[in-house]
Amino acid sequence: MILVNGEYKTHIPVTDRGFQYGDGLFETIEVRRGQAVFLDQHINRLYQGCLKLHIPAPSLEVLRFEITALCNKFNTSPENTGDCILKIIITRGSGGRGYRQPDSIEPTRIISVHPWPHYPQDYAKQGISARICQTRVGLNPLLAGIKHLNRLEQVMARAEWHDPDIQEGFMLDINGHIIEGTMSNIFFVKDGTLHTPILCHSGIAGIIRGIIIELAHRNHLAISEHLFFTEVLLSADEIFITNSIIGIWPVKQLETHSYPIGSLTQQLQIWLDQFKKQQDDHAL
């Protein structure tokens, strides 16, 4: 099910700048029992991205109304449980040929729901295997952090492997610093301190990444955001990845290095589940 500017349809004009140039943003949101999880955080990031790209943001009322309507419609289908993926795309809308923005911007707003991806539960409990990708992430402070539509680097990196035993690939920037996974943010633990790449020049500032940082501060856990090389990551005591759909997945193997499912990773999984429940209770 897809809403395009509030109408149920499945097409946009070929002149849309999202299609022409990747001129837009998107959010991928977990929906449980018909409720969008961490919706406020996602909308906030979407609005920050619109501000950076100078795209007029949709009104909060319209966005919430359409999200609720679409989730409710999906939830009433007999074959559905209410668990799904909600995707929001905002583009600059249609414009003439060339990179110059139209004088009058009429954004395109696309909201869609998709079946829930049933990942094995073992990934969260027993960990995943990851590799280092050859495809590098470019540097651009203007676009760092936001979830814009230009994701060719991730597409090319994900095409590097077909081994079903590898669940994620880690990407470096052009200077060799670890930045993120193809679909995730990266954390590691060393000597009791939590570390994660700083995303001031590249990478996506994930919603769960931000929540993990907040939970670390709340619980007086030492955390450091900085640039580091592969060798530093390989020497970690614990590694885990995050995104809005998977939550936290421990990494049990990276290249030829093995890692335990560490106590700090498990504690953060508990804190994240508790935080999510608090958000759900507040929404009710």
Image (cartoon, grey):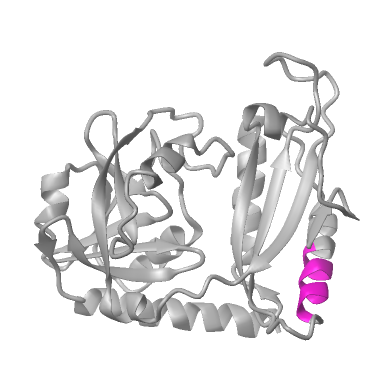
Q: Residue at x 79, y 27 (%)?
A: 15
Q: Is residue 102 above or below residue 284?
A: above
Q: Toward the viewer: 145 or 252?
A: 252
Q: Is residue 240 left or right of residue 58?
A: left
Image quadrant of residue 255? bottom left
Image quadrant of residue 35? bottom right
Q: Position of residue 234 (x, y in %)?
A: 12, 54
Q: Residue at x 40, y 78 (%)?
A: 120
Image quadrant of residue 261? bottom left
Q: Position of residue 258 (x, y in %)?
A: 12, 66
Q: Quadrant of the C terminus?
A: bottom right
Can residue 72 be found in the magenta stretch? Answer: yes
Q: Is residue 39 above or below residue 80?
A: above
Q: Toward the viewer: 13 or 276?
A: 13
Q: Quadrant of the N terminus?
A: bottom right
Q: Residue at x 47, y 42 (%)?
A: 145
Q: Position of residue 64 (x, y in %)?
A: 79, 62
Q: Is residue 33 left or right of residue 13?
A: left
Give the residues in magenta: 67-75
Can residue 49 be found in the magenta stretch? Answer: no
